[in-house]
Image (spheres, helix red, strand yellow):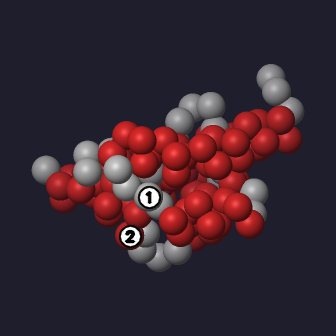
Amino acid sequence: MKSIHVLADAFDRMMVQLPQRTYRRCGYRPTYLRAMVAEQHGVQVAKMLLAKPVTSSGFMELLLRGAVDLTVEALVTLPRWRSLFTAAELAIAESRLQSMIAQAA
């Protein structure tokens, strides 16, 4: 198993790439996310977003564009990254994904 630091650095790289991937795939520029990951480590950014009481406008925009898999919530719930987050953080991410997908249906 990789060390937690190596995993966190890989997650950070994924978060840095996420705004570019989002723009290429659906034409949306998540400028707030891009600014956040430029200033802080990706794990901290994800934890900050999960700690907010409501989903971000970027999450809603990606939902409308059919790209929920590009949200931070979807990213943190991937098996590879789960060990970086607490059970409570994962529950928040999963709950947001389920509720927003249900609302969109």
Q: Quadrant of the N terminus?
A: top right
Q: Looking at the image, which is closer to me, 102 or 28?
A: 28
Element carrying mark 2:
helix
Toward the left, the furthest residue is 105
- The residue shown at (19%, 59%) is 103
x, y percent for residue 5: 85, 41
Question: Which residue in the protein does label 1 denote?
Answer: 29
* Three-letter code for the amino acid on which mark 2 is drawn: Ser
- In depth, the one of 27 and 66 nearer the eye is 27
Q: Position of residue 74 (x, y in %)?
A: 46, 45
Among numbered discs 2 and 1, the one appearing first in the sequence: 1
Q: Report the residue at 62% width, 48% height from top.
A: 15
Above or below — where is 84 with respect to 2? Answer: below
Residue 74 falls left or right of residue 2: left
Please tell me which residue lies in front, 28 or 4. Answer: 28
Query: Can residue 40 be spotted in the picture?
Result: yes
For the point 62% across and 67% down, which residue is it?
Answer: 35
Q: Label 1 is placed on what type of residue?
A: Arg
Q: Of the numbered discs in the image, which one, if any, rests on residue 37?
A: none
Contact flag, marks 2 and 1 (Cβ < 8 Å): no
Residue at the extreme top of the image, as rendered:
1
- Residue 100: give x, y in percent of width and height: 28, 57
Residue sitting at 52 percent across and 46 percent down? 20
Image coordinates of residue 7 in percent, x first then y, are: 76, 36
**Residue 56 image-quadrant placement:** bottom left
Relative side of 69 to 87, left or right? left
**Residue under circle 2?**
57
